[in-house]
Image: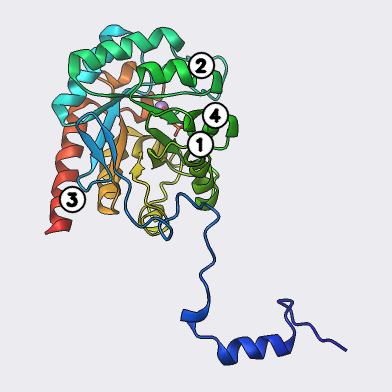
Amino acid sequence: MITVTRDGSSPDERSRLTASSRPDDVPTPSAPYRLASRAAYPEKTVVRVGEARIGAGRPVVIAGPCSVEGEAQIIEAALAARAAGAQLLRGGVFKPRTSPYSFQGLGLDGLPLLARARAESGLPIVTEVMEPALVGPVAEVADVLQIGSRNMQNFPLLRAAGRTQRPILLKRGFAATIEEWLLAAEYILAEGNTQVMLCERGVRSFDPSTRNLLDLSCVPLLGQLTHLPVLVDPSHAVGRGDLVETMGVAGVAAGADGLLVEMHPHPEQSLSDADQAIGPETLRSLIERAERVYAALRA
Ligand code: PEP
Ligand code: MN
């Protein structure tokens, strides 16, 4: 009679394992995300966008409004972001809104406005794309393509993004495990695009006090698991402007390669995510404090 233990091995097999195995002999199971794995590719990926080097050490700040609302607004935001010390401008033209009755963004008409804001400020632009068919048109204008939390597992979109040569900012799905997130990145890498950044933006929790729960532990953990740069978005994580600065600084303390922050020149007038928008002065303070923390941790 063969007796089988609870883990499925026979007592004989188990005693062989424990008698002869040393940790060094046991092969490390290879990660299912082969190209994103740090064990397979130890060298950190550095994503170059304009003057910015994301993953090279000093944290890079991407800032701007949730949505592009008009030419004057996005140019004012771009100049304010640059003056505050941000290195890239963000602004959504395709907005994944929970309600179909909320402002959906300017769509393709918003792209030339982003291009003008880039020309005025010199800041490269980051914008979200939601549909595979629009990856091409958006990639013609944007310097970085953002894939949002709700689309983290939109596999045709990931593949289409992987076929461009633009850097991709891949946000964590609000209910995605780290492994699911890295496998989503793998879809992009597997198509040949090596310029992938991960962005933690909070996961859903039981407590509505904040919009989401910022999982800062993922930052050092991802530093072990993957060579891809990791950013923190405190804005969508907390959902309230009064907590964004502190949690952005905390993201840098945790080792983030950069921050993605929603900043509106007139936060109360924001057409989307007004509650979490910070103004230019708060952004300036956030960046100053984050740089001090980064310098202190290196000292
Ligand atoms: C955004 O960056 O404006 C956005 C919609 O983010 P997320 O996908 O993280 O909700
Ligand atoms: Mn937003």
Asked if one can make out residue 179 in the rendered structure from this viewpoint, the answer is yes
Q: Which residue is mark 1?
A: 191
Q: CA distance from mark 2 to mark 1?
A: 34 Å
* First along the sequence among labels 2 and 3: 2
Q: Which residue is mark 3?
A: 294
Kindly check if marks 2 and 1 are in contact, taking CB atoms under 8 A apart as contact: no
Which amino acid, mark 1?
Glu
Q: Is label 1 or label 3 in front?
A: 1
* First along the sequence among labels 2 and 1: 2
Q: Which residue is mark 4?
A: 157
Q: CA distance from mark 4 to mark 2?
A: 23 Å
Provide residue 162's location: percent of width, then percent of height. Answer: 48, 33
In this rendering, the count of numbered labels is 4
* First along the sequence among labels 1 and 4: 4
Q: Residue furthest right?
A: 1
Q: Which residue is mark 2?
A: 102
Which amino acid, mark 2?
Ser
Report if the beta carbon of the residue with label 4 is closer than 8 angstroms to ligand 1.
no
Q: Which mark is residue 246?
A: none
Residue in the image at 44% along x and 27% along y: 164
Q: Quadrant of ligand 1?
A: top left
Which amino acid, mark 3?
Tyr
Residue in the image at 32% along x and 22% along y: 65
Q: CA distance from mark 1 to mark 3?
A: 34 Å
Image quadrant containing the C terminus: bottom left
Asked if residue 217 lies left or right of residue 100, the reply is left
Looking at the image, is 13 positioned above or below residue 68?
below
Looking at the image, is 68 positioned above or below residue 236?
above
- Front residue of 248/157: it is 157
Report if the beta carbon of the residue with label 1 is closer than 8 angstroms to ligand 1.
no
Asked if one can make out residue 206 in the rendered structure from this viewpoint, the answer is no
